């Protein structure tokens, strides 16, 4: 039976605006009948993340991508995930209490990373990036549902979720995807196209049930860098990485008037 009326407030930056917002909520929420969890409560009904998108991603990863609705209060730079700002807190809380919101469920990208001896799994909300260690050219065979689609050579590739399409994916020339479409996007990072190597220069968009397999061809050292949502992991001796959409659901709290394309226009144009 979930504990009712407990809220986790997570604040992973120490800007004056974030700290003030944290203090404000700690006083305001109990007056509205909520308990602020002292340590992270997995039975809480809501997570409030204070900061920008970086803090939002860290908040989710630090607590193993919990199955609790999360809302962001933007005190950071871009705040693409955020629903409100410090000025809008009272208005947000009023709407939260009256149920004037909906939950958008999104699926992270999941990678299974195998060496000769073992496999481990990791997940990225925005994306998982595959790069060569030490900035050298990386050579990867990329298969989609066991059909080889290309032998990629370049800086690397990233596999983005729909919600991550506006992040690194967009900077790398990938497409912005409406999150109501559940897809995986493979986006090349500085693909080489010459008489020596041929790679796709655009991103490739695939249905939600696709399995992407990446097999590295080692020419220098057998070390690969994987980056999930900005966090680096170095691996040695990888034989195969397979990617798919995770079954796990991240629950983003959206106010009733949320519109994805209005958000895109306000943040990017
Ligand atoms: P970071 O400084 O936390 O984030 C870099 C920028 O990406 C920030 O402005 C951040 O917004 C924004 N961002 C994050 N998720 C987004 C999303 N879904 N849609 C639109 N913008 C988004 O960088 P980090 O710690 O290295 O990595 C966190 C994320 O940043 C990664 O998942 C990756 O997608 C992105 N990133 C982008 C680039 C690039 O564009 N060249 C390079 C590395 C990483 P806030 O300002 O609100 O934090």
Image (cartoon, helix red, strand yellow):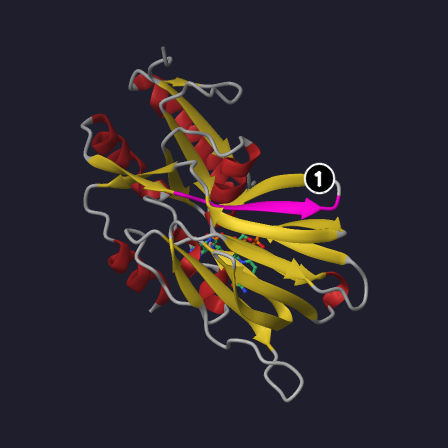
Residue 153, percent across and down?
64, 73
Q: Is residue 109 magenta?
A: yes
Corner quadrant of residue 68? top left
Q: Nearer the viewer, residue 167 or 146?
A: 146
Q: Disc 1 marks which residue?
A: 118
Q: Provide the major secondary structure of the magenta segment.
A: strand
Q: Is mark 1 within 8 Å of ligand 1?
A: no
**Residue 165 point in image, percent of width and height:** 41, 59
Image quarter (top left, top right, bottom left or bottom right) of the C terminus: bottom left
In the displayed structure, 37 sits above or below 67; it is above
Q: Position of residue 121 (x, y in %)?
A: 60, 40
Q: Position of residue 106 (x, y in %)?
A: 37, 43
The residue located at (39%, 41%) in the rendering is 73
Vertically, is 240 above or below 1?
Answer: below
In the picture, the quarter occupied by the N terminus is top left
**Residue lying furthest bottom:** 195
Determine the residue positioned at 74% across, 61% down. Answer: 133
Decide: few, some or many residues near mark 1? Use Cα within 10 Å; few <14, some 14-19, many ≥20. Answer: few
Q: Secondary structure at mark 1?
A: loop
- In magenta, the rendered stretch is 107-116
- The count of marks equals 1
Above or below residue 122? Residue 43 is above
Quarter of the image for residue 206 reads bottom left
Q: Is residue 262 found inside the magenta-colored segment of the image?
A: no
């Amino acid at each position: 039976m979930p504990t009712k009326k407990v809220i986790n407030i997570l604040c992973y930056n120490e800007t004056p605006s974030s700290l003030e917002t944290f203090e404000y909520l700690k006083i305001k929420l109990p007056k509205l009948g909520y308990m602020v969890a002292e340590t992270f409560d997995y039975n809480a009904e809501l997570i409030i993340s204070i900061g920008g998108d970086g803090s939002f991603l860290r908040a989710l990863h630090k607590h193993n991508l919990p199955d609790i609705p999360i809302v962001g209060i933007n005190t950071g730079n871009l705040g693409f995930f955020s629903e409100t700002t410090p000025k809008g807190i009272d208005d947000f809380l009023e709407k939260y209490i009256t149920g004037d919101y909906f939950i958008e469920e999104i699926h992270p990208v999941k990678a299974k990373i195998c060496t000769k001896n073992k496999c481990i799994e990791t997940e990225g909300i925005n994306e998982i990036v595959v790069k060569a260690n030490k900035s050298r050219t990386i050579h990867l065979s990329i298969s989609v549902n066991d059909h080889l689609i290309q032998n990629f050579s370049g800086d690397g590739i990233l596999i983005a979720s729909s919600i991550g399409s506006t992040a690194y994916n967009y900077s790398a020339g990938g497409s912005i995807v409406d999150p109501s479409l559940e897809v995986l996007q493979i986006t090349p990072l500085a693909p080489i196209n010459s008489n020596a190597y041929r790679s796709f220069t655009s991103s490739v968009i695939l249905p939600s049930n696709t399995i992407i397999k990446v097999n590295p061809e080692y020419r220098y050292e057998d070390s690969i860098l994987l980056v999930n949502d900005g966090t680096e992991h170095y691996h040695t001796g990888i034989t195969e990485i397979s990617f798919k959409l995770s079954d796990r659901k991240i629950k983003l709290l959206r106010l009733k008037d949320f519109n994805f394309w209005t958000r895109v226009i306000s943040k990017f144009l």
